[in-house]
Image (spheres, rainbow, N blue to C red):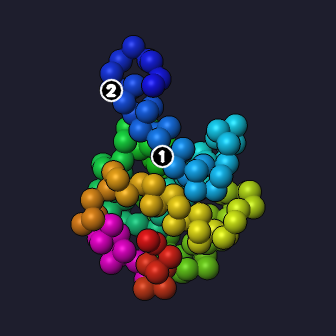
Amino acid sequence: MAETGYSSFNTTVDKTNHLLKQIEQAYGWPKERRNQSYAALRAVLHALRDRLTVEEAAQLGAQLPMLVRGIYYEGWNPTDVPVKMDREEFLARVRKEFPYAVKGGAEHLIETVLNALRIYVTEGEWDDIKSSMPKELAEVLP
């Protein structure tokens, strides 16, 4: 457990480390590759956030742990969204922001990251997100 001296900060650091550890375990990465699990989380969150409407992006962000929410909103400009992306453009966006080769490619990476996030996001919110996407892109989301 991380000790920051403030219980809310300790909790969010622990939740974030748990998410990153789930991504690392899915790929068999040692903790020393934490920069890769962080890059995976960031790339998927940013691509998803930018594809959503402002309202949907805010609803998803509200459910994320505090530290992950900061990663999610980093660099966000709500006047520039939603960015219309089809399936291939979405995958290309994730590949661009995640410059590492991974088993299963970008689709598996997206699935791995979003499955790790599922414990924090309600089923109803996932349904809303998927229903707001074109069918071919919604199929990429678990």
- Closer to us: mark 1 or mark 2? 1
Q: From the viewer's side, name the closer residue of 79 and 72.
A: 72
Viewer-proximal residue, 71 or 8?
8
Secondary-structure class at tag 2 = helix
* Res. 80 in view: no
Look at label 2 and name its amino acid.
Answer: Ser
Disc 1 marks which amino acid?
Leu
Q: Residue 10, position in %: x, y?
A: 40, 25
Quarter of the figure with the N terminus: top left
| Badge number at residue 28 | none
Per the image, the residue denoted by label 1 is 19
Compared to residue 15, the image places residue 5 above or below, namely above
Residue at position x 59%, y 63% in the image: 109
Q: Residue at x 35, y 53 (%)?
A: 119
Identify the residue under disc 2.
Answer: 8
Q: Is residue 95 left or right of residue 136?
A: right
Q: Quadrant of residue 107?
A: bottom right
The front one of 101 and 86 is 101
Q: Is residue 133 magenta?
A: yes
Bounds of the magenta segment: 126-134
SS of the residue under disc 1? helix
Q: Earlier in the sequence, mark 1 or mark 2?
A: 2
The quarter of the displayed image where residue 31 is located = top right
Marks 1 and 2, how far apart at CA: 17 Å
- Residue 86 on the magenta segment: no
- Looking at the picture, how far across and down is residue 79, in whole percent? 43, 59
- Counting the numbered discs, the total is 2
Is 59 left or right of 74, judged from the image as shown? left
Give neighbour class at mark 1: few <14, some 14-19, many 20+ (Cα, 10 Å): many
Q: Measuring 49% from the left and 85% from the top, which residue is drawn there?
A: 136
Q: Quadrant of the C terminus?
A: bottom left
